[in-house]
Amino acid sequence: MRAIGVIPSKREVSEIAHETPRIVSGKEVKVRSIEVGICGTDREICTFVYGAPPTGSEYLVLGHESLGEVVEVGDEVSTLKPGDLVVPSVRRPCPHHHCAPCRADLQDFCATGDFIERGIKMTHGFMTEYYVDEEKYLNYVAPTLRDVAVLVEPLTVAEKGLAQVWQVQQRLPWANPNGSPETGRGRGLRAVVLGAGPVGILGAMKLVSEGFQTWVYSRSKAPNFKSEVVESFGAKYISSESVSVEELAERVGNIDLVYEALGVSRVSFDVMKVLGTNGAFVFTGIPAPRPAIHVEADVIMRNVVLKNQLVIGTVNADSAAFRSAIQDLDLFIRRWPATLRSLITGRHKIDSYRELLLGKASGIKNVISFG
């Protein structure tokens, strides 16, 4: 069957004749790919900065943002049936018995580093016509979300990051004490999102839905397509080309939360200097290798201590984050249907893979459609 992957030993990105998978365990499910999203991770793997094929394979099938349809189930599968729509998680646990996170199905916190990730590390991804996975790693989505469900995985980044923020910020009367995920736990708080890519915009949607006053700080001057998208769901867009970090802080006031979805260390550490009292800063981006930058470490360290600030990093997502992302997409599609659908700026046939993976990035979210 057709698949798109990388051959690191040859530094090639190509279409591959990948063996059609079959169910070999009663707990497995066979899935037909419908859509696979293209993200910065896929594009970076195609520059051979990282990305590792499975043992014994010279190639790695790409793709970790997927929507598929169940076509066959093993005899021990109890929650899924043929015809169901599913979104798979990405990371799989390491084999070590002493790794408590992995044994607790929290492989996103793997302590050994020997986890595997579909389409990224040591196991094939979803950019192919069919794949097989265990039932426990597949998340059911309703048919009403079919045209946006490929956005679940990038939304899980914000879901996991904010879940950690809620947990740690119980240390103080920070969130709305009468709030809930339905009524808005962030009411009265101010959030700044760095970056207006898919992870940033979806994160901003999550923050707005939680009641935060939300600003998106991105490079391009407004008006532009992304600024219009951002402001259509109630966030404010500010260009870093027009407004300095110091001016940003003046406009926002005390910044309670920074959600970084940019992957640019210089901007991130500049904004960290203006994080507010009792504020939380969430890193999600992974910068590409670049020369070292100057950081005002003394200012940042003083602020972290004297202002009781929280700095956390988050990678991958657990099953709870996937469930939350599916629930929130359902909320978003009811509140902002046109805006949510507009995030998918291009649906392409598999033959367009080279332009999507190697050409200049464009739009917000491009996907490969398998039909």
Image (cartoon, rainbow, N blue to C red):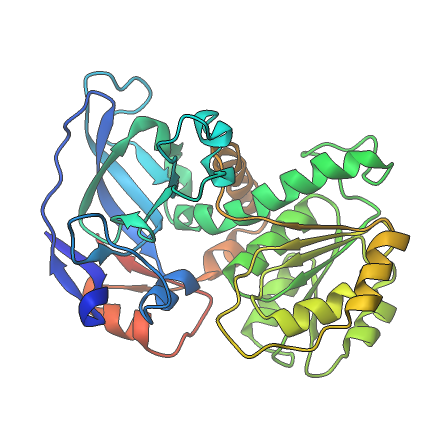
162 with respect to 323 (left or right): right
Q: Nearer the viewer, residue 313 or 100?
A: 100
Q: Position of residue 214 (x, y in %)?
A: 73, 57
Q: Residue 94: percent from the left, percent from the top?
A: 38, 36
Nearest the eye: 148 or 66: 66
Horizontal side, residue 17 vs residue 123: left or right: left
Which quadrant would residue 230 be assigned to in this image? bottom right
Classify 327 as above or below 304: above
- 74 relative to 158 in the view: left or right: left
Residue 101 can be seen in this image: yes
Looking at the rendering, which quadrant does residue 302 occupy?
A: bottom right
Residue furthest out toward the right: 306
User: Whole-percent x and y of residue 311?
Assistant: 71, 52
Q: What residue sits 57% from the left and 55% below the top?
A: 284
Question: What residue lies at 67% left-to-right and 34% top-to-bottom?
Answer: 181
The residue sitting at 56% across, 46% down in the picture is 332
Q: Is residue 222 left or right of residue 92?
A: right
Is 128 in front, or is 304? 304
Q: Is residue 274 visible?
A: no
